[in-house]
Image: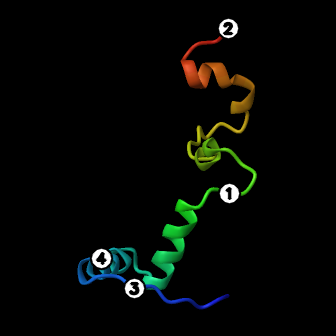
């Protein structure tokens, strides 16, 4: 891991600290997570941010994607 330093104004630091505390994580981990969300995966389109975002609970859902997405079966 590479160590780096950033500068935040008082308001930014206060907000980051409060949010990190509410999640039960250190400020550094909160910043790492924020960066991971902001940076697009290499070689992938913008849509990849949403891959795996929704789960149907059905392990065979890929076989009935139209029904899941559109509520009907063709």
| Relative horizontal placement of residue 29, taking residue 24 as reference (left or right) | right
Q: Is tag 1's residue or tag 4's residue first in the polypeptide sequence? A: 4
Marks 4 and 2, how far apart at CA: 51 Å
Marks 4 and 3, how far apart at CA: 9 Å
Q: Few, some or many C-alpha atoms within 10 Å of disc 4 (few <14, some 14-19, many ≥20)?
A: few
Image: 70 above or below 49: above
In the drawing, what numbered circle is on residue 74?
2
Which residue position is annotated with label 4?
A: 12
Marks 2 and 3, how far apart at CA: 55 Å
In the drawing, what numbered circle is on residue 7?
3
Marks 3 and 1, how far apart at CA: 25 Å
Q: Helix, strand or loop at disc 4?
A: helix
Quadrant of the rendered image containing residue 2: bottom right
What residue is shown at x 72% (from left), y 57% (from top)? Answer: 42
Q: Few, some or many C-alpha atoms within 10 Å of disc 3 (few <14, some 14-19, many ≥20)?
A: few
Residue 31: x and y in percent read 47, 76
């Amino acid at each position: 891991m590479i160590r780096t330093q950033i500068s935040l104004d008082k308001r930014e630091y206060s907000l980051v600290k409060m949010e990190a505390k509410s999640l039960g994580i250190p400020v550094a981990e909160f910043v790492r997570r924020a960066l991971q969300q902001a940076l697009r995966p290499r070689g992938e389109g913008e849509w990849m941010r949403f891959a795996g975002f929704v789960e149907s609970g059905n392990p065979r859902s890929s076989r009935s994607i139209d029904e899941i997405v559109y509520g009907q079966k063709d």
